[in-house]
Image: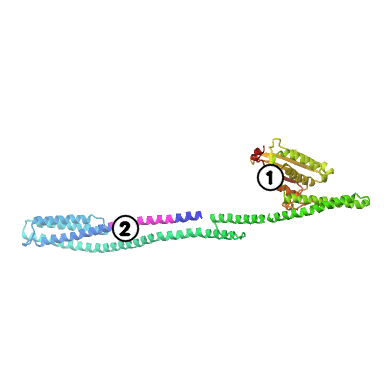
Amino acid sequence: MKKKIIIGLSIFAFGFFLGGIYIIYTIETVTSGMDHLIKLHQIEILREHLLIQTKGVQADLSLKHTHYARNIDAVINRVRDMGETAKKCFNCHHTREVEERLNDLMLRFDQYKDGLSRVLTLRANTSRIEAEEDNAFKIGEHLIAEVKNIISFTSLKLDEKTKSILNHIFYTKIILYIIVALGPFSTAVLAFIFLRGFTKPVNELLSATKRLKSGDLDYKIKGLKDEFGEVASSFNEMAASLKEHMYKMQIAERMAAFGELSVGLAHEIKNPLAGIKVSMEVLSEASSISEDDRAIILRMAGEIKRIELLIKSLLNFAKPSKPQLTATNVNDILDKTIDFSLRHPFFLSNTATAINVIKDFDISLPEVIADPMQLQQAFMNLLLNAIDAMPDGGILTVRTSHDTTLNSVRIEISDTGKGMDKEVRDKIFKPFFTTRAKGTGLGLAITKQIIEHHGGDISVESSIGKGTFFKIILPLKQEEKEHIV
């Protein structure tokens, strides 16, 4: 949208720039034409004046021997004025054809003035004076005819020129009116385009917001481009995220309800199971039952213990106890948990002795604020899974380090066991998911729960035949540590 606005305003400004140049050019052209037209009219007036002066000289020549004759000084002044006017008329710029005619006419004026000079100064016989007067008069009449022809010719051209300039002015006025009218109109059109470009996507976003508010989280905004397209994309991502969070709040409300139900059910089952287990233990000690029956009873008691363990794990997951935070040395907890894991009843076989344990502990690792018993339980679940993944032996590596950037402790537990595919890897932290024949499916779920309750994070990397790698990040929480110390 930003590019469209810049392009639109640039075109608009360029149009007004061209319009301004045209107006300036038109004003200069019209002004120049009007100046030229005024000069032509001034020349036309001079020629009319020349014609009048020439006729006056002719009149003086005709009245020379009558009692209406003017004195010689007045006649000479009139002849002088006629000559000066002729020079003014003929000194202007003309076409080559008109220039030739004017040069010829100027020669005749010179002849006319010479003839008049002789008529006015000659003191010879009467017949010669009359002949000179007659010759001058004829020249004057011819001049008057020529000036009239020139005036008629130039008047026609002047009219055409005047009409041409006036027509040009008329059409220029129309174009200027159009330009002036186009200014507000084009502004309105541009504003309409911009407003439409703004209001349409804004209305689309507003409509989408209302749909989202009504609970339609599957609604997607389509067709928007530029910056609004980016906003629409973010909006669609937000809707998808909200849908995912709503879903999680619901894969959470159901779990909470299931947890409450599980806690109640576990308590209801726990007491009868305890009574059954005690009764079966007492029955197994009776001397009247056979060894085969005693073996069956002991096996049943073992299965009841397994059910009790499952119930205990279920209670720990559904209603975990609040962490008892204290300054805790992670290295010490890991060291004790590793020793205990290798001596667990599940692994009292040659397998445990075939596992090589590598401890790579950061000796300068700072203490964390945590519940040591819960951390031990979380580490125990990870270590038991790692040992179980290496039935033929392997390498168990436990590493700790201090991440100064994140102000946290990093724990890594890896094995060289059989590993997991992506489908299993994505489910291992879900409750009741297990790959063991006798597993509860709660061990890693409880581990994740404990780590997250401590403000930490746990992740896993694994592939078939390449082992499994768990990474735990625990924050130091220095402010709580100082408060406890």
Picture coordinates of residue 397, whole percent (x, y): 75, 41
Could you tell me the amino acid type at mark 1? His
Span of residues in magenta: 12-35
Secondary structure, mark 2, is helix
Q: Is residue 92 visible?
A: yes
Name the foreground residue: 308 vs 42: 308
Task: Report which residue position mark 1 lands on.
Answer: 454
Location of the C terminus (image quadrant): top right
Based on the picture, tell me whether residue 324 belongs to the magenta stretch. Answer: no
Horizontal side, residue 59 vs residue 464: left or right: left
Name the foreground residue: 336 vs 416: 336
**Dot 2 crowding, Cα within 10 Å, few <14, some 14–19, many 20+:** some
Above or below: residue 76 compared with residue 159: above
Name the foreground residue: 463 vs 269: 269
The label nearer to you, 2 versus 1, is 1
- Residue 30 got which mark? 2
Secondary structure, mark 1, is loop
Residue shown at the point (74%, 38%) measured from the top left: 332
